[in-house]
């Protein structure tokens, strides 16, 4: 088993972007009408109004979000969506099962009531019969 090391620190500047000439890239804010206030990386030596030191340019929001590679975030989002779909499916299954269970419980409890009533009635009949029997025996023995 091999441990992959240093896959996240692609630059020698502690995870910061490095421009084409090897300097740490600086974050600038766009002032164009098309991308107002949008942040981008540019060479440290870049100055507004044009400086051809190096052509390095990258939008910040297209690069990394909180240290996560964008592609990984997209994949994670897809996975989360898939899991959410599964969860909602499971939820509806649970709801169905719960409905079934409630129906069964209702049936069971109504059956229980029926059974209890029957048992109660039978007990009364038996008690009555026993009383009659005792009377009859008493009549025969002591009659
Ligand atoms: Zn540069």
Image (cartoon, grey):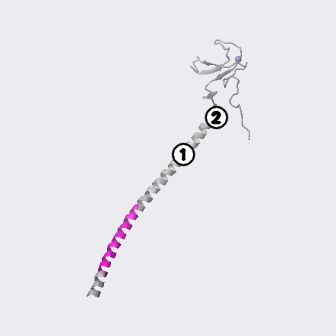
Name the mark on residue 114.
none
Check disc 2 and report its element: helix, strand or loop: helix
Residue 125 among those drawn in magenta: yes
- Residue lying at the far front in this picture: please name it: 142
* Residue nearest the observer in this picture, 40 or 34: 40
Q: How far is disc 1 from disc 2 in space, using C-alphas?
A: 22 Å
Residue 35 percent coordinates (x, y): 58, 21
Residue 122 percent coordinates (x, y): 35, 73
Mainly helix, strand or loop, the magenta region? helix
Check contact, mark 1 vs mark 2: CB within 8 A.
no
Packing grade of label 1 (10 A; few <14, some 14-19, many >=20) is few
Q: Residue at x 44, y 59 (%)?
A: 104
According to the picture, the residue beneath numbered tag 1 turns out to be 87
According to the picture, the residue beneath numbered tag 2 turns out to be 72
Packing grade of label 2 (10 A; few <14, some 14-19, many >=20) is few
Query: Which region shows up in magenta?
Result: 109-133
Task: Tell me: residue 111, above or below residue 72.
Answer: below
* Residue nearest the observer in this picture, 76 or 52: 76
- Residue lying at the far left in this picture: please name it: 143
Numbered label tally = 2
Quarter for ligand 1? Answer: top right
Residue 32 percent coordinates (x, y): 59, 17
Q: Quadrant of residue 52?
A: top right
Indicate left or right for 120 with 99 as reference.
left
Residue 40 percent coordinates (x, y): 62, 21
Q: Quadrant of the C terminus?
A: bottom left
Q: Residue at x 60, y 21 (%)?
A: 39
Check disc 1 and report its element: helix, strand or loop: helix
Indicate left or right for 137 with 28 as reference.
left
Task: Tell me: residue 121, above or below residue 101.
Answer: below
């Amino acid at each position: 088993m091999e441990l992959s090391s240093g896959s996240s620190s692609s630059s020698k500047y502690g995870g910061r972007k490095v421009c084409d000439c090897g300097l740490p890239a600086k974050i600038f804010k766009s002032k164009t009408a098309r991308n107002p206030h949008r942040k981008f990386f540019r060479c440290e030596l870049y100055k507004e109004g044009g400086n051809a030191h190096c052509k390095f340019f990258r939008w910040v929001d297209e690069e990394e979000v909180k240290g996560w590679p964008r592609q990984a975030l997209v994949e994670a989002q897809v996975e989360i969506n898939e899991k959410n779909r599964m969860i909602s499916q499971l939820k509806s299954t649970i709801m169905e099962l719960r409905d079934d269970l409630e129906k069964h419980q209702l049936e069971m409890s109504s059956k229980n009531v029926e059974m209890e009533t029957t048992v109660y009635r039978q007990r009364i009949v038996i008690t009555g019969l026993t009383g009659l029997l005792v009377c009859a025996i008493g009549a025969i023995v002591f009659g």
